[in-house]
Image: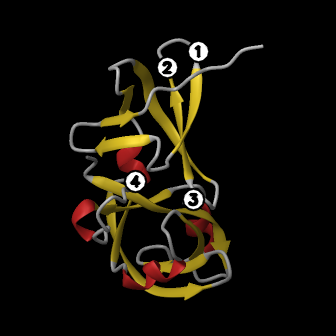
């Protein structure tokens, strides 16, 4: 598992005092209210204020005091230590922990590694890339996913059948 996790990405400056608009990578914008410190480019920074909009958080981060300084952080990721991340319910996982996991079926056929997780609203879909150019989309459903072991970076699924015309 990764030591640091991305919780947001700075999209652009907000106002003239160095505040930044942040695209959330967490389940809820409300979770920004609980953050006290973040890492940006490996440097720890304190969050001094949080305002929430419909789809973004506006943060005031120590050491970023002008619009010009905020502009330098455009597109940078805000990271936290894993210890600061909230505890998840059993059977749920951070996307950061799923990316890179090897996906095999119950017949031990390796399909590739999780490249990304697509959130569709009804269920997540694992985007798996094989060693060549083959790619497969795996719905993250209990009927398909047999087990997830993020400690050992392995996901076991029921066999995938490919249809061709």
Q: For the residues marked 2 and 3, what is the alpha-carbon distance in whole angstroms? A: 37 Å
Mark toward the start of the polypeptide (4 vs 2): 4
> 103 and 47: which one is in front?
103
> What residue do we see at 40% from left, 53% from top?
41
Mark toward the start of the polypeptide (3 vs 1): 3
Q: Which residue is mark 2?
A: 130
> Whole-percent x and y of residue 105?
39, 26
In this rendering, would 37 be left or right of 161? left
146 is higher (above) or lower (below) than 87: above
> 156 and 62: which one is in front?
156
**Mark 3 or mark 1, whichever is nearer to me:** 1
18 is higher (above) or lower (below) than 49: above
On-image quarter of the C terminus: top right
Q: Which residue is mark 4?
A: 41
> What residue do we see at 42% from left, 42% from top?
145
The quarter holding residue 134 reads top right
Q: Secondary structure at mark 1?
A: loop
In this rendering, would 151 be left or right of 35? left
Mark toward the start of the polypeptide (4 vs 1): 4
Please report contact status of discs 4 and 1: CB closer than 8 Å, yes or no: no
Q: Which residue is mark 3?
A: 72
92 is higher (above) or lower (below) than 85: above
Q: Which residue is mark 1?
A: 133
Q: For the residues marked 4 and 2, what is the alpha-carbon distance in whole angstroms? A: 31 Å
Please report contact status of discs 3 and 4: CB closer than 8 Å, yes or no: no
> Whole-percent x and y of residue 57?
57, 78
Q: For the residues marked 4 and 1, what is the alpha-carbon distance in whole angstroms? A: 32 Å
Please report contact status of discs 1 and 2: CB closer than 8 Å, yes or no: yes
Q: Secondary structure at mark 3?
A: loop
Q: Secondary structure at mark 2?
A: loop
């Amino acid at each position: 598992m990764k030591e640091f996790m991305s919780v947001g990405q700075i999209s652009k400056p907000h106002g003239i005092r160095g505040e930044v608009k942040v695209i959330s990578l967490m389940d809820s914008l409300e979770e920004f209210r609980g953050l006290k410190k973040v890492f940006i480019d490996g440097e720890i920074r304190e969050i001094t204020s949080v305002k929430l909009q419909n789809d973004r958080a506006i943060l005031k981060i120590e050491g970023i005091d002008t619009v010009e300084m905020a502009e330098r952080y455009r597109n940078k990721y805000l990271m936290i230590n894993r210890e600061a991340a909230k505890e998840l319910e059993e059977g749920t996982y951070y996307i950061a922990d799923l990316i890179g996991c090897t996906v095999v079926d119950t017949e031990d056929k390796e399909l590739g590694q999780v490249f990304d997780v697509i959130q569709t609203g009804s269920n997540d879909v694992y985007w798996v890339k094989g060693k060549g150019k083959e790619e497969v989309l795996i719905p993250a459903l209990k009927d398909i996913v047999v087990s997830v072991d993020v400690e050992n970076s392995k996901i076991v699924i029921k066999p995938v059948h490919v249809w061709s015309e």
